[in-house]
Image (tube, rainbow, N blue to C red):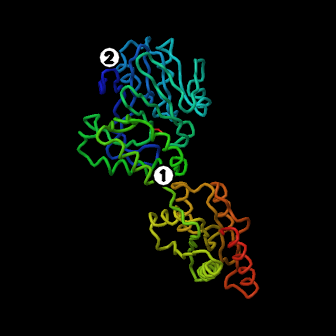
């Protein structure tokens, strides 16, 4: 891809990766992707981001179609994930007066990328760099989707450079959204679900920073530039990141082989409901992943019941646990229980994993051996009474 002029003194200088079929190890990318970068020419020259290593030669060639590399003044580093920072070191070696600009959170990452000397300026919210005839205004967007993330606004051209925000993995013939023949909205949502959804709570808090900006175009880091109704994409992020937690809702997930863990689950759900919560039972062996995600995101807390098979929790339980990092679950209240035969390790292992994912965990799992005895059921009553206070 050659450099493409997008406004009189702003150019797209990124590269295409049409063959990419897996992004970040886990995300299938049927339509490849692009690593977008931008060049802004005022009296001074600024670059927004670099590209993935392996594409550096094309990236540098694109820049040189506009200006000599030695004349670039600033490299704005919106985010240091290697798909955008992979050419920084090479650019530094070719651009002797280059000043790097990044968020404070990005500073240690930038140092770890370049592993050498460079002039680095950190910026905060609303900081301005005057390029002479054009200004760049910075907006910190932590955890969208890394702690270092920031966006940049160019008021003279009404362009928001949005980093990974509002992106999509599409590698099209055209750089423009309105010339993309595939279903951009579908890919936009797919990207949000895979990359942004786990950080929805952070994104929700930061999106209002964009409200005062007059945005005519969004230059993302992947996929088409958004110029046909760009605000709709911001509005969709606001909709998708809205807080949907129902404050009394507690989901009692369970998997049960012989009915003992199910019996405990039913008692817990009944007692929590009697204590004023809205507890719902969900059998993990028949609950689709999308529905389980929805339960997690909309509940104030979760209780997970697991038996123990061969010293471990069974797969449906681990499948559920594996969903927590795919949604915004930090600080969500959780508790674990289960029936077991001899070892009883399953509940403890699940509790340890949830704790490791920074959920707010009720201290000790409740466990009962095989068919719950009267004494164990009495202990369960105490457990649910404490749980009601924990979730309440
Ligand atoms: Fe496109 Fe988070 O890197």
Q: Residue at x 31, y 23 (%)?
A: 3
Is residue 214 visible from the viewing direction of this image?
A: yes
Q: Earlier in the sequence, mark 1 or mark 2?
A: 2
Q: Residue at x 52, y 75 (%)?
A: 283
Q: Is the residue marked 2 within 8 Å of ligand 1, measured from its CB?
A: no
Q: Which residue is mark 2?
A: 65
- Left/right of residue 360 with respect to residue 73 in the rendered view: right
In terms of depth relative to the viewer, which is nearer, 156 or 330? 156
Q: Is the residue marked 1 within 8 Å of ligand 1, measured from its CB?
A: no
Residue 5 location in percent, x, y? Answer: 29, 24
Residue 185 location in percent, x, y? Answer: 32, 49
Rendered position, 327 above or below 66: below
What number is the disc on residue 286?
none
* Residue furthest out toward the bottom: 374
Q: Which residue is mark 1?
A: 197
User: Dot 1: within a 10 Å radius of its alpha carbon, few (fewer than 14), some, or many (20 or more) residues?
Assistant: many
Q: Quadrant of residue 228?
A: top left
Q: Secondary structure at mark 1?
A: helix
Residue 66 location in percent, x, y? Answer: 34, 16
- Left/right of residue 309 with respect to residue 194 in the rendered view: right
């Amino acid at each position: 891809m050659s450099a493409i002029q997008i406004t009189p003194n702003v150019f797209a200088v990124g590269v295409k990766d049409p063959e990419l079929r897996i992004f970040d190890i886990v995300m299938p990318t049927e339509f490849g992707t692009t690593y977008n970068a931008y060049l802004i020419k005022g009296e001074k020259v600024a670059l927004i981001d670099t590209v993935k290593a392996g594409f550096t030669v094309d990236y540098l060639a694109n820049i040189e179609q506009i200006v000599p590399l030695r004349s670039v003044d600033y490299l704005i580093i919106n985010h240091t994930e290697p798909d955008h920072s992979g050419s920084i070191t090479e650019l530094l070696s070719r651009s002797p007066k280059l000043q790097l600009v990044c968020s404070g959170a990005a500073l240690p990452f930038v140092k770890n990328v370049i592993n050498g000397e460079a002039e680095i300026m950190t910026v905060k919210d609303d900081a301005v760099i005057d390029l002479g005839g054009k200004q760049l205004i910075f907006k910190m967007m932590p955890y969208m989707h890394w702690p270092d993330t920031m966006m940049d606004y160019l008021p003279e051209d009404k362009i928001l450079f949005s980093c990974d925000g509002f992106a999509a993995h599409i590698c099209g013939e055209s750089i423009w959204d309105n010339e993309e023949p595939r279903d951009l909205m579908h890919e936009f949502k797919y990207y949000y679900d895979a990359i942004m959804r786990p950080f929805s709570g952070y994104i929700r808090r930061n999106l209002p920073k964009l409200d005062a900006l007059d945005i005519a175009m969004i230059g993302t880091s992947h996929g088409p530039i958004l110029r046909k109704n760009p605000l709709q994409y911001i509005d969709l992020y606001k909709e998708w990141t809205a807080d949907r937690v129902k404050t009394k809702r507690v989901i009692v997930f369970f998997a049960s082989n012989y009915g003992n863990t199910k019996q405990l689950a039913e008692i817990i759900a009944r007692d929590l409901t009697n204590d004023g919560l809205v507890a719902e039972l969900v059998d993990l062996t028949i609950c689709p992943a999308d529905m389980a995600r929805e339960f997690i995101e909309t509940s104030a807390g979760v209780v997970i019941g697991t038996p123990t098979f061969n010293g471990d929790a069974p797969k449906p339980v681990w499948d559920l646990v594996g969903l927590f990092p795919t949604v915004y679950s930090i600080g969500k209240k959780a508790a674990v229980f289960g029936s077991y035969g001899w070892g009883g390790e399953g509940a403890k292992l699940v509790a340890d994993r949830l704790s490791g994912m920074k959920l707010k965990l009720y201290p000790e799992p409740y466990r009962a051996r095989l068919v719950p005895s009267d004494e164990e059921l009495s202990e369960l009553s105490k457990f649910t009474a404490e749980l009601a206070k924990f979730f309440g």
